[in-house]
Amino acid sequence: MTEEQERLTPGALFRLFLFVSVQSFGGTLPFARRELIERRRLLSEAEFAEMLAIGQILPGPNVINMSAALGDRHAGWRGATAAVAGMVVVPVLIVMALATAIGAVTGFAAVQGALLGMAAAAAGLLLGTAWRMAGPMRRARRALIVFGAVFGAVALLRVPLALVLAAAIPASLALHGVFRRG
Amino acid sequence: MLALTLHIMAVSLGLSLLAVGGAIAVVPEVYRLAVEVNGWMSPARFAELYAISQFAPGPNAMILALMGWEAVGGGAGGWLAGLAAMAAFVGPTSVISVFAFRSWAARISPAKQVLIRTALLPLSVALVASSGVLITLSLGAVPLVLGVVALVAAASAATKAHPLLLMAGGAAAGAVASLI
């Protein structure tokens, strides 16, 4: 953030991230990118990429980590709180209203069928997403070993995720040379 | 009710600390805890709620709100539990994030960032793929489910079709199949 740039108030941060979250169907990332970089010019492309990278490395939802950090830069803890609240409060109310509304009509066979089909589509989307995410690693042997081990442990053996991560994160970092000096 | 809501918040907080690579990476663990460990819902109900969470706007973390909502059986208590679950999921990790961005995180060299992301990518991919497999299995291996999963997976991998459009297509296929 450059010195001349406006500092957003907590209220403005809440509205900004509310605007991002309520239009985010199928992932917040493209919408956050368009709003923060292209329309409001709060971050450059490079700054956005770096904040997102750190948000991915830290525990917690990526874009929410990023919104907390951006809110903090503009207005400290109140800004961080406002930004995160903007991201989640209204979507939570919407999703519970949706679940309540669907619950009221699940007696109909067609609704049951539609939910089943929708859930199957959601599973298909996850598999398609995994395939696209895997683009850079489809020929990387070390990455495929890590993939196979984690997939086997989680999907097939149902090992608790904490144990899987405690073993797989250090192993993958070491395998990729993160601990090497320089 | 209070004890259950606190339990849900504790589960949600634990899940958030495991969400390296985003909320979508903890879906298999949400499944394990909500269905297998705590028995808050059936496998098929979990799949339904996951679908509803993806059909609504907002971050991928919305499944956590529905986990809390369903665990107390919906209603007014469900709304509170849903909000509480979400607060527990994003609150502490946001505090960690602010401290990390203020101090060490911004000083990781770009080269090291790339290396760390490269090392974490296969974990994220494996967790997303596991979510897809677990949800498919929880729906039962009937032809309709397998057909929709395969078609949507192929369409989303190979085209830029909007996720909502694909989910609406799945819903339509399911509704038609139930009426035949």
Image (cartoon, rainbow, N blue to C red):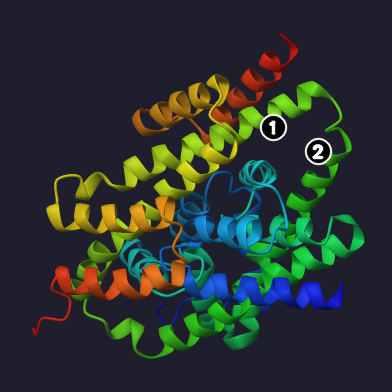
* Mark pair 2, 1: CA separation: 9 Å
> Which amino acid, mark 2?
Ile
Mark 2 lies on a secondary structure that is helix
Residue B65 to residue B158: above or below: below
Q: Which residue lies furthest to the right in this view?
A: B76
Are the residues flagged by discs 2 and 1 in contact, CB closer than 8 Å? yes
- In this rendering, does residue B53 appear at all? yes
Instruction: Return the chain for callout 1.
Output: A
Return the x and y of residue B84 as percentages of the image width and height.
75, 71
Q: Residue furthest front?
A: A157
Return the x and y of residue B74 as percentages of the image width and height.
85, 55
Give the position of the N terminus of chain A as an image quadrant: bottom left
B91 vs A38, left or right, is: right
Residue B159 to residue A79: above or below: above
B96 vs B34, left or right, is: left
Residue pointed to by mark 1: A115
Instruction: Return the chain for callout 2.
Output: A
Q: Which of marks 2 and 1 is nearer the N terminus?
A: 2
Please name the residue shown 26% across and 76% down the image. A170
A18 vs A73, left or right, is: right
Disc 2 with disc 1 on a shared chain: yes
Mark 1 lies on a secondary structure that is helix
Residue nearest the viewer, comparing A66 with B29: B29
> Which amino acid, mark 1?
Leu
- In this rendering, does residue A83 appear at all? no
Please name the residue shown 90% across and 56% down the image. B75
Give the position of the C terminus of chain A as an image quadrant: bottom left
Residue pointed to by mark 2: A102
